[in-house]
Amino acid sequence: NAIKTKVDELLRLVQLDGLGPRYPSQLSGGQRQRVALARALAVEPKILLLDEPFGSLDVKVRKDLRRWLRKLHDEIHVTSLFVTHDQEEALEVADRIVVMNKGHIEQVGSPDEIYDRPANPFVYDFLGRVNLFHGRVHNGRVQIGEVDLDVPQHSDTDNEAAIAYVRPHDIELNRTPSDKGDIEAKIEEIFPIGPSVRFELIRKDGGGRIEAELTRERYNEMKFIEGEEIFISFRNPRVFLGEGGGI
């Protein structure tokens, strides 16, 4: 009948063909989430509202389901409002992201726009680990320790406090100083994590801790060791004016 045909069609859509006769207790967590989505799709909604749908699942299942959900949307073209506190989840699933803070919209844009060009410190800090470096801006240049950076967007600013935000993978580690200025630091701890290696460093000028991340290939090439004193420089810093990092 029509109901069975619809059920079979939805089970195929959520990749659960042939599992219709099973009870919920006979399904995995990820399968139960897909059944819940199939039930929501049964009424053919114009808008699908998803409030942290994968929040109770383990990391691997979450990753599998969000890839599946992205593929499903490409197939059925239903508009979804997906609420999540998982930044990686939002960046992977969404076509457009709205970053909110205490009910206020901080930024709206594509995943690339949000990640590559954060509108303010809150968005930058919200989208993953970040290092903060305090300095001062003088007519389009910011001085952070021995590092002098070009910040043309602040060319009319003179002698104002600023904070440079730099992600761990944009921290460069070298044994010799570069010609653009460096911050000296000591490697406190090294953590190999799958394809990448994370470093905890202490600035020698008393400016605090730094977190850096290298690829496994770069780490094997350089062979850094704990306790070694090195020089760090930045790629892609984003500078915001003010002690609190305001725009």
Image: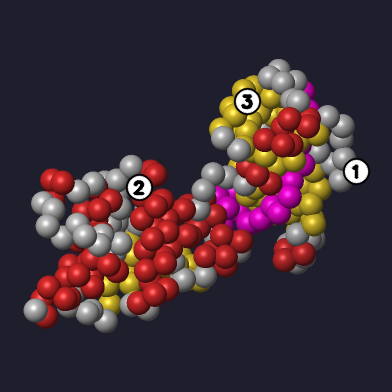
> Along the polypeptide, which appears first: circle 2 or circle 3?
2
Compared across the picture, whether 184 is left or right of 18 comes to right
- Secondary structure of residue under mark 3: strand
Q: Residues within 10 Å of mark 2 (few under 14, many from 20)?
A: some
**Please, which residue is most extreme toward the right here?**
179
Compared across the picture, whether 104 is left or right of 31 comes to right
Q: Which residue is mark 3?
A: 190
Along the line of sight, the residue nearer the viewer: 41 or 50: 41
Residue drawn at point x = 36 percent, y = 50 percent: 62
- Secondary structure of residue under mark 1: loop
**Between marks 2 and 1, how big is the CA–CA gap?**
47 Å
Q: Which mark is nearer the camera, 2 or 1? A: 2
Q: Is residue 119 visible?
A: no
> Along the polypeptide, which appears first: circle 2 or circle 1?
2
**212 falls in the magenta region:** no
Q: Amino acid at mark 2?
A: Val
Mark linked to residue 61: 2
**Between marks 2 and 3, how big is the CA–CA gap?**
29 Å
Compared across the picture, whether 220 is left or right of 240 comes to right
Q: Amino acid at mark 3?
A: Ile
Q: Residues within 10 Å of mark 1 (few under 14, many from 20)?
A: few
Residue drawn at point x = 74 percent, y = 36 percent: 218
Mark linked to residue 31: none
Please, is residue 164 above or below residue 215 in the view?
below
**Between marks 1 and 3, how big is the CA–CA gap?**
26 Å
Along the line of sight, the residue nearer the viewer: 143 or 72: 72
**Image quadrant containing the N terminus:** bottom left
Q: Which residue is mark 1?
A: 179
Tell me where the magenta segment starts and ends, as one range: 229-247
Q: Is residue 17 visible?
A: yes
**Please, which residue is most extreme toward the top here?**
227
Along the line of sight, the residue nearer the viewer: 112 or 177: 112
